[in-house]
Image: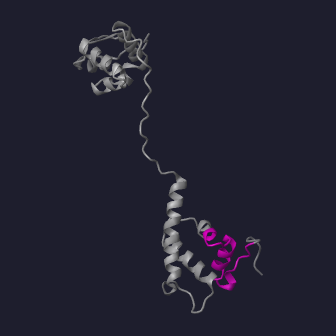
């Protein structure tokens, strides 16, 4: 039995519905036509709750215990107890992009940009006759500097480099007096 009481506002909203005969604080009475619609849905193997929502009745306002109770009452009144059990229809879920999916998508875009730069090294600032590693690192740096949302470690791993090698490449740009010992960065410069 439903113990949920209807607020004054809920009573006004429900009373305006053409499928409701009367609504008080603790009880609601539906029309016979509406009861027949629900029973027809049950006979057809359809979702009876959908009949409520399609006719402007909020399951949240009514309360599921009250809705289940009235469906059970109508089943016994109209002798629908022998109907096969209805299998609930699964709602289609909207595809949600996870952080891992977004990271993979960004990595693929960054790899495509790096591959394009590696294929045409004239677009990256490297000296003529540079080795393959330097070209790869310069392409990775240019893609990262272009504010593309990518994790540099993932790009390095894709090309088969450890991040520490890429970090060493970045350190080569610093002037020698600015060089920081990567093993002990807090050591005092002499």
Q: From where the camera sits, is residue 11 visible?
A: yes
At 55% from the left and 78% from the top, the residue drawn is 139
x and y percentages locating residue 10 in the rendered image: 31, 20
Q: Quadrant of residue 137?
A: bottom right
Judge by depth and name the residue closer to the eye, 122 or 11. Answer: 122
x and y percentages locating residue 118 in the rendered image: 53, 80
Quadrant containing the C terminus in the rendered view: bottom right
- The reply to whether the magenta stretch includes residue 155 is no
> Where is 118 relative to 7, above or below?
below
Going by the picture, which residue comes out furthest to the bottom? 128
Judge by depth and name the residue closer to the eye, 22 or 97. Answer: 97
Q: Quadrant of residue 131?
A: bottom right
Horizontal side of 112 relative to 18 (left or right) equals right
Horizontal side of 165 relative to 30 (left or right) equals right
Number of numbered tags placed on the structure image: 0
Judge by depth and name the residue closer to the eye, 8 or 38. Answer: 38
- The reply to whether the magenta stretch includes residue 172 is yes
Q: Which residues are magenta?
A: 156-182
Quadrant containing the N terminus in the rendered view: top left
> Where is 182 relative to 130, above or below?
above
Q: From where the camera sits, is residue 26 visible?
A: no
Horizontal side of 133 relative to 102 (left or right) equals right
x and y percentages locating residue 143 in the rendered image: 51, 73
Colouring used for the render: one colour
> Where is 15 relative to 130, above or below?
above
At 61% from the left and 69% from the top, the residue drawn is 158
Horizontal side of 97 relative to 174 (left or right) equals left
Q: Quadrant of residue 138?
A: bottom right
x and y percentages locating residue 159 in the rendered image: 61, 73
């Amino acid at each position: 039995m439903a113990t949920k009481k209807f607020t004054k506002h809920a009573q006004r909203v429900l009373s305006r519905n053409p499928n409701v005969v009367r609504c008080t604080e603790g009880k609601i009475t539906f029309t016979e036509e509406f009861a027949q619609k629900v029973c027809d849905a049950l006979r057809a193997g359809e979702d009876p709750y959908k009949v409520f929502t399609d006719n402007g009745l909020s399951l949240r306002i009514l309360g599921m215990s009250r809705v289940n109770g009235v469906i059970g009452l109508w089943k016994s009144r109209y002798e629908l107890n022998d109907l096969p059990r209805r299998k609930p229809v699964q709602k289609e879920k909207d595809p949600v992009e996870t952080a891992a999916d977004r990271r993979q998508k960004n990595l693929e875009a960054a790899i495509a940009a790096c591959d394009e730069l590696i294929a045409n090294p004239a677009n990256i600032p490297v000296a003529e006759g540079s080795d393959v590693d330097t070209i790869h690192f310069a392409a990775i740096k240019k893609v990262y500097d272009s504010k593309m949302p990518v994790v540099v470690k993932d790009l390095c791993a894709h090309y088969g480099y450890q991040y520490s090698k890429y970090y060493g490449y970045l350190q080569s740009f610093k002037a020698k007096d600015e060089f920081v010992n990567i093993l002990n960065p807090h050591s005092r410069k002499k």
